[in-house]
Amino acid sequence: MMGLIDNISTYHRICPQCNMVYRYQEWKDGVHNFDNHIFLTLELCVFLRENVTNHVSVSRVVDSLEGLRGEKFPSRDVIFQAYCHFEALTDAEYTYSCVNCGFHPPVVVMDLHRKGVFKMTVSDLKVPPDDFNGEHDVESFWNSVHLSMISRGFFQSSADNPFTVNPSYECWAPWIGSETRRSDTVLNTEFKKVRTCPSSTEAQLSSVTEDHLIDELAKQKVILPVVRKLCKACNIDTKGSRLDLITRLKENMKSRQTYDKVFQSIWGASGGWSVILCPHGIVYSIKFNIRAESPRDFADLLLSWKHLPNVCVYDFARGLAAHMNLRVPHSPPFQPYEGRLSEPTQENVRAARNGKLHVSLPWLHERVYCGEENAHPVTGSSEHYVLYDRFHEKNATDPKDILRRIQLVPELKGWLNSQVAEQFFAKMRKSNYFFNNMAPSTHAFLMRSVIHRHNTSTNTALLQRQLNSGRRLELLSTITLSSLGQAVIAQQSDASKKTEHNCGGPGNKAVAQKLLPGPWNEQSGLDVEGLPQQNFGIDCGIFMVMNDMPYLRRWWCKVLLENLGIEGHGRRFAHFTSEGKKMGEGCLPPIFRVTRKRRQSTLLPDTILQNILVSVVLEDGCTAILRLALTCQKFEQIVSQEAFQKEAHFRWLDSVVNWKRHSGSHIQEYRKPYTISRCSRLQCSQLYKDCGAGYQGNGQRGVLLGFYSSDDHPGYCSWDCYTDDGGWEE
């Protein structure tokens, strides 16, 4: 990057047998040969890569270098093509997996980045033949994309390049990591969106998307001539106000042709990116949509996976569950209860609405064994659910959809960041100004590379944070991946630590390491010769005879009596007491009568107690909820309910806002409950009260900190975390 060097000579070799021309391309010299005329230093190539990753276009980098060096550089487009040529020749493994979740994450979050589009003419796409089933060879497609980038160094223009890849229904594959996908054959059935007469079920699934599209059209500051021109293109009456025209567009949205024209007017020609992420923010799959989004796009990705996640979070959960179960009717993917957490009875719906229904999924924390073929390798469960993200869960119109809320699962409540996809899009949106102007193949090629580096940096930050929090002295170089793709610490190869020892089970591993650090062999009854074994489960393998149970029960009782103290009487039957010695000799039965303590019940009814606690929160603010939860189990049970927190929040809102002075739309938009979110900054990751846009305060009666029409730091607990994470660059 020190300047330009002109008037250089390039040599090449020719094979005497086949006349193959060998270009000069020696990486060890620190230069990259693009087309025998343009050479870039490797330092400049890496510098361009870092700038593109940090949302700075190549043209802006060239402008900065020209101003710094005072020299005229070659065309920006040529340098950009040379950089793409360099990336295509770079060896990179696009694994797309998380070091915590492994190759097969049990919980995923799915969403669409609508602002990430590329220019194309959808009407020019040819309908595939009737025998085409939507299967694509992922390796062949992405190799052809790489070849199109490399071949740019041999042709003057893309029109003369026979290796150029253009979007088509028959050759446009998503990207899924090699260990995550089922095989090299993946699905992309966007050609089925072209049908003009969809079934009643598909029309129902697309209705929400159409309503959302009209909402976006109404929100945008579109002048009347633009809307009138759009109506004219859709053969709709152009007379009337702007609201009248939008209403007519909505009435004609059932026509796919009208839908595509409105979509292209708002978001560009292509349909954005469909991505699947794990809760840690690692992208597992990306699909560059040709047409407008539908649940079909995410169904294509999930059906291409080797193992379907146990929990999928999506903004249109009901539509995704219905679509996938219709596509695979012989073995519906989302079961039980069509992906709901509980049976959709009126009792369960009422209990969920009142905050009294809790569905535990213990296999999210500890693997179970079910013995079924479609069991997930990480959790061992064959259950598959589709849940709404926290932001869209209240948009559901079906009352049964309340059984698809994350808050019903104790293992996910307060831990799962369902907005991780939106936070990822907020970061990538900074690059839209130059990515959206690229050719389709270039857009897909570079975006896959940028997301790969995003995954790599996020994985590194995860490992460093975990090693630091665990006070482990191991370096990142000692981390390896298990067979499921999860990070584990490799054993040291010291000769002094090669001696292997035996430990009696998983509960003794920590004790064994403290006694004698080093590798240990875990043995069970399956390793003992001569023992009757049961080798069809995940237990220790020792076969218990029913005749042994009385002795086992007696031994268990003795252990309990020796180690558990009786309130007010101590460890009466411990081995060192006289009663314990007599009991061991069989002279005294292990029986002791404890005097019953009678207490008068002075508990208040729950409704009165809840009103009192709400008043306490209004006087002291939201911090009182934590103090009340630590007071006693009864208080903790009351203040942890979502209904209690909503009541306290709405009573605070009513104390600081006179809603009679505002319109109905204002009340609907800003009289809303807050959510508990986790800060997106990896160094923070603290839970915080997320009020979003609207009225801000600490929950204390009559105290209003301010009103904000937009959320200045979405996904972050404070402005400092937002700016430290690079949010100020947006």
Image: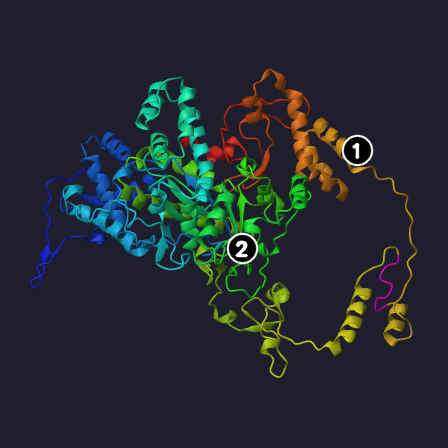
The disc label shown at residue 472, or none: 2
Q: Residues within 10 Å of mark 2 (few under 14, many from 20)?
A: few
| Number of dots carrying numbers | 2
Q: Amino acid at mark 2?
A: Arg
Q: Residue furthest left?
A: 16
Q: Nearer the viewer, mark 1 or mark 2?
A: 1
The relative height of residue 495 versus residue 2 in the rendered view (above or below) is below
In this figure, which residue is indicated by the disc labeled 1? 608
Identify the residue at the far bottom of this view. Answer: 530
- Viewer-closest of 644 and 729: 644
Residue 34 visible, this angle: no
Q: Which residue occupies 49% across, 47% down?
A: 322
Q: Position of residue 299 (x, y in %)?
A: 43, 49
Left or right for 7, reference 102: left
Task: Give the SS element for disc 2.
Answer: loop
Q: Residues in magenta? A: 569-576
Q: Can you give x and y, in whole percent of width and height, for residue 130 in the image? A: 30, 52
Give the mark nearest the N terminus, 1 or 2. Answer: 2
Q: Secondary structure at mark 1?
A: helix
Label 1 Cα crowd, 10 Å radius (few <14 / some 14-19 / many 20+): few
